[in-house]
Image (cartoon, rainbow, N blue to C red):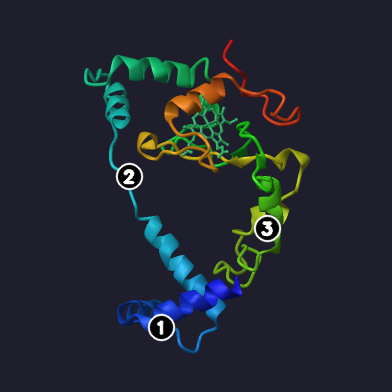
Amino acid sequence: MGGDAARVKARILSDGGLRAAFAALFGDPAPMAAEDVLVAAGKAMAAYQETLVSPPTPFDRFRDALAAGRDDPAYPAAARRGLKLFVGRGRCSLCHFGPLFSNGEFADAAIPYFVPGGVDWGRYGGIQFLRASPFNLLGRHNDDAGGDSDFKTRHLKLEHRNFGEFKVPPLRGVADSAPYMHDGSLATLTDVARHYSDLDLERLHVDGEAILRPCT
Ligand code: HEC
C-alpha cells in the first residue's frame, strides 16, 4: 500500500497538468504525505465517477412506455419472455432491482470459491480487510468527522454466512460487459443463465441464501 501511495504521488508530481489540477483542489502535493495524496486523488476520482450516467437502454424505453400506460412495440418478444422469468420464476429481481438492478447488498450466487492457488473468501475476507484498512470510514481520512457515515462500518459483524458472499452487481448495460461474475468465470450471459438454472445447492450455504433455486 505504501508503494502504491508513493507511485501515485510521483505520478502526480511528474505531470504538470495533473499537479495543477490537484493543487487547485487540495493544495500543493509536494509537501503532503504520500498516503494523503493517494486518498485525495481517490476522493477526486470517486466524485468524478458519481457524475457518470449510463445511457438509456431499450429496457429503459420499454419501462418508460409502460409507466406512461403505453406499449413499446420495438421491445423484442424474447426480451419480454426474459423479463417475465427475471421478475417471476427466476426470482432474479429479489436481489437485482431498482434503477441499477442491485439491492446494494452482498449475497451468495454460488460461484465456486476454490480458485487456483487457494480459496476466494469473498466478503468474509473483505470484512477483515476493511476493518484493518487505514482507509475505512472509522479512520482519519473520513471527512465526516462526528457524523454518522461510519455507522455501518462500526457495527459490521463478521459472520459465517459472509464466506462466499459478493456484492450484488448492477446489471445496467450488462450485455456489453462480459465476462461475468467477480472472477470473470462466466464468458457469456447464456452461461450466467445456465449457472443460475443448474444451481449447485450443495455449494450454497445452508445458512445463506434461501432465495436461489435451480430450474426444475
Ligand atoms: C440472492 C441474490 C441474487 C439473486 C436472487 C440473483 N442474483 Fe445475480 N448476482 C448476485 C451476486 C451476489 C452476483 C455476483 C456474484 C459474483 O461476482 O461472484 C450476481 C451476478 C450476476 C450477474 C453478473 C453481472 C456481472 O457484471 O458480472 C448477472 C448477469 C446476474 N447476476 C443475473 C441474475 C439473474 C438472471 C438472476 C435470476 C435467475 C439472478 N442474477 C439472481 C446475486 C443474486
Q: How many marks?
A: 3
Q: Earlier in the sequence, mark 1 or mark 2?
A: 1
Q: Gap in Å between the C-alphas at discs 1 and 3?
A: 30 Å
Q: Where does the image place residue 114, in percent across and percent down from the top left? A: 68, 40
- Amino acid beneath label 2: Ser
Question: Which residue position is annotated with label 2?
Answer: 54
According to the picture, the residue beneath numbered tag 1 turns out to be 13
Q: Amino acid at mark 1?
A: Leu
SS type, badge 2: loop
Dot placed on the residue nearer the N-terminal end, 3 or 2: 2
Whichever of labels 1 and 3 marks the residue nearer the N terminus, that label is: 1
State the separation of the CA atoms marked 3 and 2.
30 Å
Where residue 103 sits: x, y (%)? 53, 37
In this view, the residue in front, 213 or 197, is 197
| Residue that protrudes farthest toward the top in the picture | 216
Q: Mark 1 to mark 2: distance in Å?
A: 32 Å
- Is the C-beta separation of discs 3 and 2 under 8 Å? no
As rendered, which of 86 and 151 lies closer to the eye? 86
> Is 16 on the left-hand or right-hand side of 188?
left
Tell me if residue 179 comes above or below residue 48 in the rendering. Answer: above
Q: Which residue is mark 3?
A: 129
What residue is rendered at 34% in x and 20% in y?
79
x, y percent for residue 207: 75, 30
